[in-house]
Amino acid sequence: MEQPVLNAHNKEEHRPSHTTEHIVNRTMVNLFGCGRAISAHIERKKSKLDFALPQCPTEAQIAQIEETVNEVLRRNLLVTMEYISQDEAMGRFDMKRLPEGASDTVRVVHVGDYDECLCIGAHVSNTSEVGTFKIISHDYKEGVFRMRFKILSD
């Protein structure tokens, strides 16, 4: 199959952290019924994600987020790509974050059967390559829950 033409990407993500971002997003959607992160800063040393939530998660819920993400990472899920047209993506994905002038072909990243989303970034090929997810701090202000996390090497 011919490789589709996508928009250029100017950043080389830390693959384990970026892949984990996908899992954290799906976990937050599943546990809290919120949308995916409204802001993300993903780096090797530490990362942060902001979610719009009506209230701050309890300490028990914070622990549940961490446990769920690590349980998903331990499933050794394949991370795969699918290429579809923007028309096919409509109604299946939030298209608001696509840049103006985005290519007609978009890439869907699948983390096993756990998550799928539009993404142009770099990922590991299997969740077994990630390590352990650790929430290192969190806060809540004016409807925004911010979590800071890092990946501990196993």
Image (cartoon, rainbow, N blue to C red):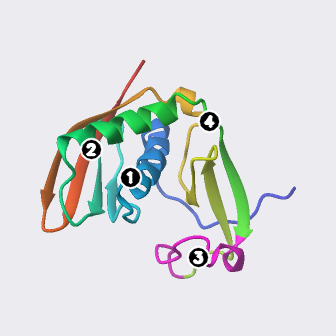
Which residues, given as a range, are shown in magenta? 85-100
Residue neighbourhood size for the residue with mark 2, other residues' Cα within 10 Å, grouped as few (<14), some (14–19), many (≥20): few
For the residue marked with disc 4, what is the amino acid? Leu
Q: Between 31 and 15, which is closer to the camera in this rendering? A: 31
For the residue marked with disc 3, what is the amino acid? Ala
Which residue is labeled 4 in the image?
Answer: 77
Which residue is labeled 1 in the image?
Answer: 31
Q: Give the quadrant of the C terminus.
A: top left
Instruction: Identify the residue at horizontal 59%, vertical 76% (top origin).
Output: 102
Q: For the residue labelled by badge 1, is the local secondary structure a helix, a strand or a loop?
A: helix
> Are circles 4 and 1 on residues that touch, CB within 8 Å?
no
Q: What is the magenta segment's predominant secondary structure? A: loop
> Are circles 1 and 2 on residues that touch, CB within 8 Å?
yes
Q: Earlier in the sequence, mark 1 or mark 3?
A: 1
Q: For the residue labelled by badge 4, is the local secondary structure a helix, a strand or a loop?
A: loop
Residue neighbourhood size for the residue with mark 1, other residues' Cα within 10 Å, grouped as few (<14), some (14–19), many (≥20): few
Please, which residue is most extreme toward the left here? 141
